[in-house]
Image (tube, rainbow, N blue to C red):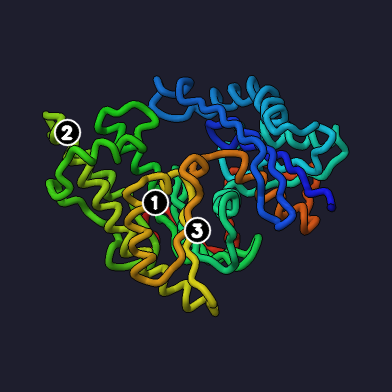
Amino acid sequence: MSKKPLILGIETSCDETAASLITENEQGIPIVLSNIVSSQVDVHKEFGGVVPELAARSHMEKIDWIVQKAINNSGRKIEEIDAVASTAGPGLIVCLSVGLSFGKAFACALDKPFIAVNHLEGHALSPKLNSKLNYPYLLLLISGGHSQFLSVKDLGKYKRLGTTIDDALGEAFDKTAKLLGIEFPGGPQIEILAKKGDPNKYDLPKPIFNKGGCNLSFAGLKTAILKITKKIKTDQEKFDLAASFQKTVEEILYKKTKIAFSEFEKENKLKEKIFVVAGGVAANKNIRSMLINLCEEENYIGMFPPIELCGDNAAMIAIVGLEKFKLKQFSELNHPAKPRWPLDESAAFLKGAGVKL
């Protein structure tokens, strides 16, 4: 029986300090031995959002302890680690630098390979942590910093089909929650409030709903929420607005995903049609349910990471490290932190006023 690789993953791209050890069984199925995530919600709550300098300081204070805990919880010894994988981008550069520097030093001390990982690729491969995932597949990545459709042809081979031209969906959720008086991070609470409200109470805009292919836009929706919240006086009106926002987002994603299905099928010769939804917003149960129903309508296999692995974590970084380790795709120790690092580096930049779709 051959020794299976043991990979240490490290994640510090924003406000979670995380470390994980994974390996695989004889059938090549990944096994998560430990996955430690330390949130900084209490650090940033009073500011209503992530403060980069405070986040970086918290990472520096915790990273050594978090990695040690991940090793202890894995039941394996430090000498057994075969490679270290750290997030190198995209993200807040002061935060990225903490985990990236720690990972490089750790790999150097062990004399083991170092693997720089794209945070978005971690999300893209996260369903591999609990399912078999074949290429090619269509990816919808919806998080606090990104919202895009990508055709995933293989490890490291991505073609962007659509993206947000302004705000990410997770950001729209968080900003809406803030306008409704919900403490940071309030995005996940929108779904809870929505259950108490009338989803048809407010007719909210759906920017670029009838143009732009499967590109997305949420800035106009956010502005509409801002105007309505200035007139709201009762809790029930808050519940109604949350429900209307949730419904509007679902309608946007339903239509844009159908368009993405069509574009994906034109791009690839498919034996099976696979649709992966990943990122923090993939934990929204209503959005999950709607997209699962859409997959059934269109004969797609819908795949989601477990809800606890939708947000930022190090297991998804380790799974990318594992795949790259097997291909001997190692990184140099001078690999830089990249605050912007798109999966499809050839895709045009589509953000800001005057964008032509």
User: Is 275 above or below relative to 14?
Assistant: below
Which amino acid lies under the numbered mark 3 shown in the image of this protein?
Phe
Name the N-terminal-most of marks 1 and 3: 1
**For the residue labelled by badge 1, is the local secondary structure a helix, a strand or a loop?**
loop
Q: Which residue is mark 3?
A: 349
Q: Quadrant of the C terminus?
A: bottom left
Provide residue 264's location: percent of width, then percent of height: 47, 72
Which class describes the residues within 10 Å of circle 3: few (<14), some (14-19), or many (20+)? few
Q: Residue at x 50, y 49 (%)?
A: 305
Provide residue 89's location: percent of width, then percent of height: 62, 44
In the rendered image, is residue 65 in sight?
A: yes
Q: Residue at x 49, y 40 (%)?
A: 308
Q: CA distance from mark 1 to mark 3?
A: 11 Å
Q: Residue at x 47, y 29 (%)?
A: 50
**For the residue labelled by badge 2, is the local secondary structure a helix, a strand or a loop?**
loop
Name the N-terminal-most of marks 2 and 1: 1
209 sits left or right of 36 in the view: left
Q: Which residue is mark 2?
A: 230
Q: Are marks 1 and 3 in contact (CB under 8 Å)?
A: no
Name the N-terminal-most of marks 2 and 3: 2
Which amino acid lies under the numbered mark 2 shown in the image of this protein?
Lys
Which class describes the residues within 10 Å of circle 1: few (<14), some (14-19), or many (20+)? some
User: Toward the viewer: 85 or 285?
Assistant: 285
Which class describes the residues within 10 Å of circle 2: few (<14), some (14-19), or many (20+)? few
Q: Tell me the tag on residue 166.
A: 1
